[in-house]
Image: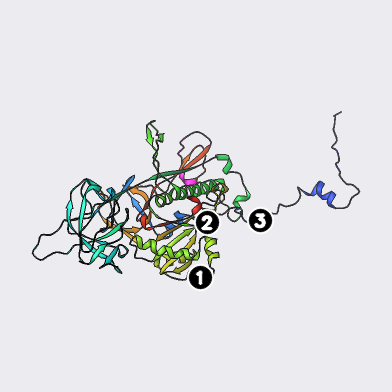
Amino acid sequence: MSTISKGTITSNTAQSGYNSTWASLYDTDMQVPQIWGEIVKRYGAGIGILEFLYMTGAIVPIAGPVKKVFEEGSLVKTVELHEASGLFGEGAGAHIHLADTEFVSNNVSYLALNDQVVIPAKYIEISGVKATKPEIYQVTNVVAGVKHLQQYDLTPLNIHAEIAVTIPAGTKLMVTGGNYANGTDSGKAKSSGFYVNYFYTSTKKADWSMTGSIQSNERYYEKLRGGGTGIFTKATMEADFLLSKYINDEIFIGGGVSNTLTQHDRDLNDVTVTGTVGLLQHMVDKAMKQYYTSAYQYSDFDDVKDLLISQGVINRDVTMFVGSLLYRQIENAGLDFLKEFAGGTQLMKTWNELNVNFKSINKNGVFTTIKELPSLSDPTAYGADSFDDYFKGLGMIIPDVDVTVRGSQEEPATFKIKNLALGYKNANGENRTRINKVLPGMTSVGGATNGDIAVSTFDDVRGSLLSEFMLIALRVNQMILVQNDVVL
């Protein structure tokens, strides 16, 4: 006779209604999960300098790791006094000595024989009466010497002019061409040189990896709006986002690499790390400065014109990029004058068509278009508490001008670019703007990109993104860095 084992009849029926007690015991696993139909991004991506360079089309190709750009300074200049002048009587000759910084060699400066210097009225008397206009003194003799020891003898054109008030050391005097008698010899020739700027590339990378089995798990991610095709989509999108962030950070706060920093290539050679200099460093080194106390005021916009004039900027259309704190201060300074942008320069129209909202101020003849850079308030980066509102209170005023550039000897053509441009390495069939490569292992993740090729026997797939680029910043001397004076 066989041996049997009967099954047990299970039951959990009890004296209870279908209430909260029943629900907590039996209903939790039975309920269909209520899933929101979209992936919700907790944190948004802030727009930075990179995005605006793309919006304005300021992208140029480069064909080497270094871009050499030649610039010319002003053809005319003032001259600075080494020491205070003496007092010189009515119609009498005078003499001055120039600061050492005025000399390009021991005895060669901008000021030459037969040139004229213009003496401000506050130092002049005419027949014993305070002058109401500047007076001209002509260089009639040069006593050779080493730099500030060289003496320039001056004669007033007005016989009644006298230097009755000492001209202080460090005063910068206007210079113009001299007057000549007919049939006489000419003066000295003048020449100007070139300033050479070097811009270096920076290489940024972002990587991703995943094991093969991870992709084959079904998730809500594939079914929700904002999702993608498995973790492969998520991994590659995140790497792409991070590469853009790294580029954005470099072209904003990058300071170049002046220290010794090397890495090994495949053959274990030491290769020097390079980096491009970002906009902020360029402006700290070369731009004009405007410091405000406590908060930016409406009247502070009046100073922008004087700064532009000091650098010979004729164009009166400028863009002011600001952090959130400075933006709020500008709004609070006078809401009645801050208007939504509705026209203006072609550059601004282009941005407006891309649904980028601007506000503008027309003050003292300068049309300032204001745009907040959200990235400067990012609490995970520039808006971190440790920065003490440094970036939130920052402003950068950039004139809207094209710059005519003559490249290096290898690229002699003359072309125009905006005063800010982003250059990507692209030559001889190698475009390093944004290289994206999949390195497959023993997995089919990535689809057709893998084919039948594997670069390892590991059950995974990897990917790497790379970009080689440089920020080209021209006429930085015409830009204005706006900061709270607590930085001083």
Q: Nearer the viewer, residue 191 or 141?
A: 141
Q: Which residues are magenta?
A: 447-459
Mark 1 falls on what kind of element? loop
Task: Classify 358 as above or below 384.
Answer: below
Marks 1 and 3 close (CB-CB < 8 Å) = no
Say which residue label 3 marks.
Answer: 36
The residue that mark 2 highlights is 374
Q: Which amino acid type is shown beneath numbered disc 1?
A: Phe
Here the colouring is: rainbow
The stretch drawn in magenta includes residue 456: yes
| Coordinates of residue 262 in the picture (x, y in percent) | 40, 35
Which mark's residue is nearer the viewer, 1 or 2? 1
- Judged from this view, the residue extending furthest toward the top is 1
Q: Position of residue 351 (x, y in %)?
A: 45, 64
Amino acid beneath label 3: Trp
Q: Mark 1 and mark 3: span between their CA atoms? A: 44 Å
Q: What's the CA distance linking mark 1 and mark 2?
A: 23 Å
What residue is disc 1 on?
337
Marks 1 & 2, CB-CB < 8 Å contact: no
Residue 72 relative to residue 348: left or right: left
SS category of the residue bearing label 2: helix
Q: In the image, is residue 397 part of the stretch drawn in magenta? A: no
